[in-house]
Image: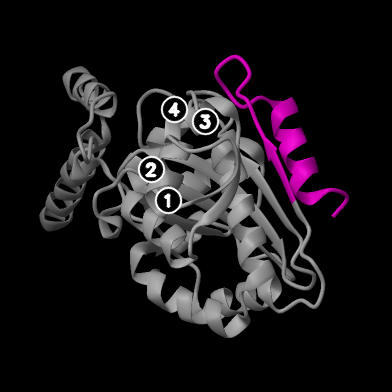
Amino acid sequence: MKRLLALICVLCCLTGCAGAEKDWTEEEWESVVMALASDEAEPVPEKRRASFRSGWLPAAEKGYINVLLISSDAPDIDQNFGRADAILVCRIDLWTGETRLLSLPEDALVTIAEAPEPVALRYVNCFGGAGLTARCVNDALHLGVSHFCAVNIEAFIAIVDALGGVTMELAEGEAEALELAKGAQKLTGEQALRYVKLRRPGDGSTRVRALLSAVLRETTAGGSVKQVLGLADLLLPSVDTNLTTDDIVDLIFALFGQDHPISFDAMGMTAADGGLNGDLAAQGREFLYGGK
């Protein structure tokens, strides 16, 4: 009996310690808030980061792939705990290649168990990477995102350059900022990055959405399945994703194996009152899923 009581006491102590570890002190949280607002590469301490678990995300929807796309400022994509400067949900019909892009407001306030207070959506990645961000997006908008794919700045540039650049229609102000002529211009990876960063905070990631749509259109129009498979093999080491090889092959054949033009549709969301309310969630679901 004494041994049993001792064991119970030890377990209680361990449980109490584990609970205490989860509690944030005011000073610790203030330090993280300041780090998030700074240029610090990994603003959330390692002990406060959650490791991705497959149970966070639902099973893949039959006939579709719903993937969260993230552009991160993490210097090393293998340690993807940087801020997200673009967050989009991409839904692809594996039979027809029909693609829908929903860009999310990275400044929207969301609640996660890993933080004691609501945080901007772009900071969720710092607490648990793209997997946690995908879980958070599912919770906030009641979506069924099953996959994620994150790239950092270096990978972003490499992808555009590997595609031979991407053609964008530049407005006068955009052309002036990039020191190019107004109108259709083929951008290099560096120029594409500068183009994306011209956007103002809270503008719904308009330029990111436009750029991704242009990349998808140009590659599906001019690339063969064989070429794109080679490109995917080259770029995968620069990407943080839970897409399997089979998933990637299915995506490539859906987007590049069609004998007709692929349908692309894009929409941006703006946070209402700092958050993602029910009406916005309904609009996002209707755009992505329609009547399905």
Mark number displayed over residue 174: 3
**To which residue does mark 1 refer?**
130
What is the crowding at mark 4: few (fewer than 14 residues within 10 Å), some, or many (at least 20)?
some
Q: Earlier in the sequence, mark 3 or mark 4?
A: 4
* Gap between marks 1 and 2 measured at Cα: 6 Å
Residue at 36% across, 37% down:
114
In front here: 77 or 4? 77
Q: Secondary structure at mark 2?
A: helix
* Gap between marks 2 and 4 measured at Cα: 10 Å
Three-letter amino acid code of the residue under disc 4: Ala
Which circle, 3 or 4, is nearer the viewer? 3
Quarter of the N terminus within the rendering: bottom left
Q: Are circles 1 and 2 on residues that touch, CB within 8 Å? A: yes
* Gap between marks 2 and 3 measured at Cα: 29 Å
Can residue 102 be seen here?
yes
* Gap between marks 3 and 4 measured at Cα: 27 Å
**To which residue does mark 2 refer?**
125
Look at the image and say whether residue 278 sits in the magenta stretch: yes
Q: Earlier in the sequence, mark 2 or mark 4?
A: 4
Q: Secondary structure at mark 1?
A: helix
**To which residue does mark 4 refer?**
120
